[in-house]
Amino acid sequence: MNLLDVFKKKHEKELAASHLDARLRKQLNMMVDYRLCEALKVLSQKITVPRNVVGEHIIEVGSFYVAKAVDDEHKLGLLRKHLIDSHLLDDGYDDDESILRIGEAGSISELLKLAEKVLHRWHTFQRSLGIAEKTNSVDYLNRCQRDFSLASIELAMWLEKHGLFDDPSGKNIGN
């Protein structure tokens, strides 16, 4: 290696170091789910850029949306609950549908949750009919009927509160 190559190499290293300092890059050392690492690897291969570039962009986009959610008390509560339930206490990985619902952090996710609750209570009520016949007891049937009614009322109240009806009589906006 000649002297010119040595100076060239030294200059390139100094230039690269000053470039990194200028961008104020920091290394994030934290544990993340292996599936996220694999997704990052696949994305970087498809886009044909280094993983750190894709990772930085994902953090940038995610922090933009999370910052928007923090400004709204309701969305902040939903986000906090999700982070604790899914990332702190659980395995830390969400399916695509769950991510979209949290990303919306709005009425649709609440509506889906209430509708799922009503549907679950309905199925439980239907099963309780058979149990009541076999046991000749209506206690469980009555409890399931009450739970279904309460869930249905909760859904109806939510729909009314969020302006999906013109008035309490239940006339649709579109009619």
Image (tube, rainbow, N blue to C red):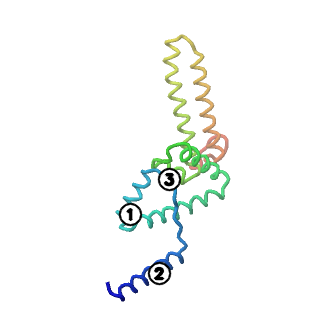
Q: Earlier in the sequence, mark 3 or mark 2?
A: 2
Circle 2 packing at 10 Å, graded few (<14), some (14-19), many (20+), is few
Give x and y (percent) for residue 99.
Answer: 50, 51
Q: Residue flagged by tag 2: what amino acid is it? A: Glu
Residue 40, by quadrant, is bottom left
Circle 1 packing at 10 Å, graded few (<14), some (14-19), many (20+), is some
Which residue appears at 58% of the width and 52% of the height?
105
Report whether 25 appears left or right of 156.
left
Which residue is identified by label 3? 31
Q: Earlier in the sequence, mark 1 or mark 3?
A: 3
Q: In the rendered view, would you say 59 is above or below 131? A: below
Q: Residue flagged by tag 1: what amino acid is it? A: Ser
Question: What element does badge 3 sit on?
Answer: loop
Give x and y (percent) for residue 46.
Answer: 35, 63
Nearer the camera: disc 1 or disc 3: 3
Viewer-closest of 139 and 100: 100
Which residue appears at 48% of the width and 18% of the height?
130
Q: Residue flagged by tag 3: what amino acid is it? A: Met
Which residue is identified by label 2? 14
Residue 65, by quadrant, is bottom right
